[in-house]
Image (spheres, rainbow, N blue to C red):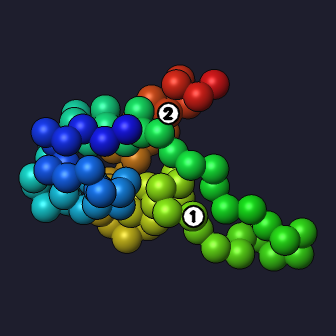
Amino acid sequence: MTDLELTGDDEATPHDIAKRFSQGEISQEETIRVLGNWEYVSDAQTDGYNFLIFDIPGSFSEVTQAFTEGLLDADTYNAIIDVADERYN
């Protein structure tokens, strides 16, 4: 799910949304709403030997990467996980 009014284009990725949040373009509430309800693709798979071979664009790993890069603070990241967990579980 992308919110065109929020993102400004239909090609935005979860990482793009996190970057816009870090730049102050999007509020924490909107970021949590959008990324918590995003239609994520399945995360990367392993080959049975390596933990992860690659990350798939549009997967939740983009949100995790944004957190690792400091684009999302811990409270925002955890709130996104909580909303996504409620939605998918």
Camera-nearest residue between 15 and 57: 57
Comes first in the chain, label 2 or label 1: 1
Residue at the image point whose x is 37% and y is 38% from the top: 1
Residue 53: image location, x then y, percent: 71, 75
The one of 37 and 82 positioned closer to us in this rendering: 37
Distance, label 2 to label 1, CA atoms, is: 18 Å
Above or below: residue 72 compared with residue 46: above
Horizontal and vertical percent for residue 4? 19, 41
Residue 11, compared with residue 75, is above or below; it is below
Up/down of 29 relative to 14, above or below: above
- Residue 66 pos. (x, y %): 38, 63
Q: Residue at x 47, y 56 (%)?
A: 58
Q: Give the quarter of the figure containing the C terminus.
A: top right
Position of 30 with respect to 41 (left or right) is left
Name the kind of residue labelled 1 in the image.
Ile
Residue 56 badge: 1
**What residue appears at the point 74 percent right and 62 percent down from the top-left corner?**
45
SS type, badge 1: loop
